[in-house]
Image (cartoon, rainbow, N blue to C red):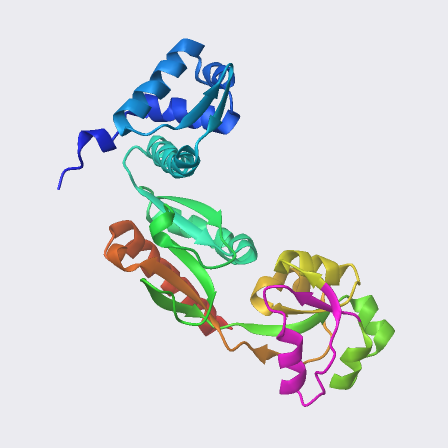
Amino acid sequence: MQTPRRFLPSLPLLSAFEAAARTGSITAAARELCLTQSAVSRQIKALEEQLEVELFHRERQTIHLTVAGDGYAREIREALRRISTASLNLRANPSGGTLNLAVLPTFGTRWLAPRLPSFMAAHPGITINLVTRPGRFEFRLEAIDAAIHFGPAEWPGAELAMLMPETVIPACSPSLKERFAFDLVADIRKAPLLHLTSRPDAWEQWLRANGVDAHGVHGMLIDQFATAAQAAVAGLGVALLPDLLIGEELRSGQLVPALDRPMRSTECYHLVWPTDRASHPRLAAFREWILAETSAARAGA
């Protein structure tokens, strides 16, 4: 069903309103849009007449959003951002072969990015845009085609394909290992422990899995794996880190296992996509490629 014209204002009217709402000034909005103040005022007035709603309170030379205007501005700002992003993507790849992928920061940097050239070589018409998302989000509210997710195999309104499991190891600098001379699992508790905010009970799980009291475990909190790895390299403590994300540090000797006690995580990495895009050709091509890559990685582990 076609939307009535009065509910589809033109972009110039919306842009004028959004700029004035964001800056709180007709003058600033006019300067930003390279228009005269009177032109911006006319566009906002035309928008109010079209919607039959007052968007600003006007007091002498100042404007203030009404309650309705404030809510409308938030919605319009997001809509304009999505239009801008879509236009930028189209300009970057006029053929329209763009795939917007949300990735976990460290996984994207350390595992995915080094492998992407092979996908690009096999699919030269597809451009992949990467954005970092550390947690779940609503696909319907973001211009994202798929995501790489670590956690349980569930995501409302989406489909998942398991990519790979994860094994974590207690890793530290060689100097810290020498200092504490780890021998028994209980020795780990004598050293500073580094905790990831996204997995606050990881050390408790590891200790219990190895038959050691997990009560009262404390230590530094860190919000990303890459930062935790660097903190461990610097000798600040022992961190539980996925072996697939610290291969370079292990090979170079910057990090070593504090003890040979790897633990398989209870959750896995998944590729996630909205159900209504399951057959999207670019997504299908990427899904086939990354499933092959992760299968090869598992076989070589």
- Does residue 122 belong to the magenta stretch? no
Q: Quadrant of the N terminus?
A: top left
Q: Is residue 104 above or below residue 65?
A: below
Residue 150 pos. (x, y %) = 48, 66
In this rendered view, identify the residue nearer to me: 235 or 299.
235
x 41%, y 56%: residue:
147
Can residue 283 be seen at all in this image of the molecule? Answer: yes
In this rendered view, identify the residue nearer to me: 173 or 89.
89
Q: Which residues are magenta?
A: 192-220
x 46%, y 15%: residue:
30
Residue 262 pos. (x, y %) = 62, 79
Q: Residue furthest bottom?
A: 211
The quadrant where residue 44 appears: top left
Residue 28 pos. (x, y %) = 51, 18
Q: Residue furthest right?
A: 179
Residue 101 pos. (x, y %) = 41, 50
Q: Is residue 88 above or below residue 259?
A: above
Left or right for 101, reference 133: left
Q: Is residue 210 above or below residue 63?
A: below
Left or right for 236, reference 75: right
- Does residue 197 belong to the magenta stretch? yes
The quadrant where residue 91 appears: top left
x 44%, y 72%: residue:
152
Left or right for 135, reference 238: left
Can residue 145 be seen at all in this image of the molecule? Answer: no
